[in-house]
Every structure is written in structure tokens, then in C-alpha cells.
Amino acid sequence: MNRKTKWAVALLALSAIGQPMWVTQSFAATKIFPPITDAAYQKECGSCHMAYPPELLPARSWNRVLGSLQDHFGDSAQLDAATQQRIRDYLVAHAADNAQNEHAFAIVHSLRANETPLRITATPYIAGIHSAVLDPLWGGNPRPKTLAECGVCHLQVQNGNFTMRKFTVTDEAFRSNHLD
Amino acid sequence: MSRANVVGRVALWVLLASAQTPNAAADPVDDLLKDFSAQGAGNFSAQAGERFWDHPVTDPKSGEVRRCSLCHSTDLRRSGKHATTGKVIEPMAPSVNAKRLSNRADIEKWLLRNCKWTLGRECTPQEKGDVLVMIRGR
């Protein structure tokens, strides 16, 4: 067999197989969160704050949140036992450690095994990304008081998209805060 | 089955159906006011509800001054803003937001939760009745 024939045979073999094997092993993770599908979660939790994608906290954190609703960050968010269990099941089933999502993966791996934060913004990955926003010297716009309403900057949050975001920081604002 | 019999049966069903409708559509606020009266409250007044809505209460833990209107605004036809999270709260007035005062369980849940946060205690039947009458008129 000469060189040309060898190449032809190799090409034929490849096309017969179709896709090379290593390509079929695709990475299923995405950066987009699926829509909230539980009506009770949307109604009971989403009245006071955005119904956060459950993928933003690990299951152990959701269990802690649902176990302390009588003092939910200083407010009573108490639910009847059946609704509480239903919401807990939904959140745990879709929690960060059960999700195929790049952000969820990063959140889980930014935490130590013995850490169970109650706040999404207390996970090192999310806190790190947003540290400048809560810095009193940040002269950007918008200037949220807390990070509770993601939609202030994440304009596509209703579609589970945190990648598209909008805020401005001007050098004038920076100077007025830093160089007085 | 005779023809008169069939007509009679149809008439009976129509009667039964029309008799059931008013029960199903009973106003949850009227229901609650009846219960509050049974607990010794009465003479519910929108004026008292209005005073209650704006009455300031200092939270002993945080030192914050809280009142209903802090999150729900003094003009019930406009939307409010959650004091902690900043989430927009839809208007309370049934005249612009038909969902308000339409479900008894929801009314009871929010009165319990929000009285506890705002006043540090549950509201009395009189306070709840006054404020419901006030909201209903908006």
C-alpha cells in the first residue's frame, strides 16, 4: 500500500465510524439556569425576594434555610408543614450539588465541606465576584443596598441568564471617591 | 321518563346551580370580619385602619422605625418596595390589583407574618378588621 492509498483507507474508516469517539463525550454543563417550575416556591418565597434558582446553593444550605424559616434573616417566613416540605424537596432536588451547571459547580467547589452558608452571597464564588458592588467606594451605577435582587444588574435573570449584565463605573465616580 | 319529569329535573338542577354560586363567591373579607366580630371586635372603621397603616413602631432589636406603609407605600394604589430586599410589591388596592383580598388563606398568612415583623406581635382582631376595611375601600 502506498502512502496515498493508506490515507484514503484511513479517511474511509473515519467516515464509516462517523464521529470520533472523544467528541461524543460532550460536557453537559451550561451557564443558564432552568426556569423555576414549582408554583409554591415561586409564590411563597418569590413574594418578598426573587425566587432564586435552587442551583445557587448546595442541598445542605437549603435544608438549613428551610429549617429556620421562623427567623428568616430577621423576618418570619413560616409556612405550613406540607408547603415547607414540598418547597424543601424542590430546592434540594435542584440544588447546586445536584445540578449540571458551571456556576453551580463553581459555587459548590468554592465551599469547604463543613461550610453551610445561609446566603447565596456568602458563598466564596458569588461573594468574590460581587465584592466591588458592596464596597462603599464603588461609584458604579446601579448601587444596590443589598445583592438580594439580582435583576438590578442581571437584566435577563428571568430567563435564568446571569451572564448578561449591565452596570456602569465611570472614572469620575471613582476619582470622587478615591482621590479627595 | 315523561316530558314533564325531564323539564322538572332540568329546572331542579338549574335551581341548585344558581343556589350554589353565591356561596362559592362569598367575600373572604366579609368572612374574616364575621370571625373578628365573634372574637369581640366590631365597628370596623377605615379611618382607624388608615391611622394604623401609618403608625410608627420602633423595632427594639434593630432600632428601625417600621410601619405598614414602609413597604406598601401610603398610596395603596401604587406599588411599594420591600424594606430589606428592595423587591417591588404590587399595589395593595383591589381597585388596581384584583388579586388583593381575594383569598382568605393568603390574607391570614400575610397579616400574621407582617404584623409580627412590623409590630413585633400579632395584630388584634380589631386592628386586622380596621385595616381590611380600609384596604377594601381603596
Image (spheres, rainbow, N blue to C red):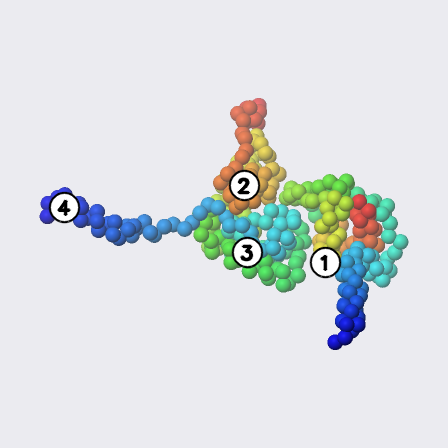
Q: Are marks 4 and 2 on the same chain?
A: yes
Chain ID, mark 3: A
Query: Amino acid under label 4?
Result: Thr
Of residue A95 and residue A119, the one placed in the foreground of this image is: A95
Ranked by sequence position, the earlier of labels 2 and 3 is 3
* Residue B35 in sight here: yes
- The Cα–Cα distance between marks 1 and 4, rounded to whole angstroms, is 80 Å
- The Cα–Cα distance between marks 4 and 3, rounded to whole angstroms, is 59 Å
> Mark 1 Cα within 10 Å, few/some/many (few <14, many 20+)?
few
Q: Are marks 4 and 3 on the same chain?
A: yes
Residue B61 vertical placement versus A136 (above, below)? below
Question: Which one is closest to the eye, mark 4 or mark 3?
Answer: 4
Q: Kindly identify which residue carries mark 4.
A: A5
Mark number, residue A156: 2
Q: Kindly identify which residue carries mark 3.
A: A91
Residue A94 vertical placement versus A49 (above, below)? below
Q: Secondary structure at mark 1?
A: helix
Q: Secondary structure at mark 3?
A: helix
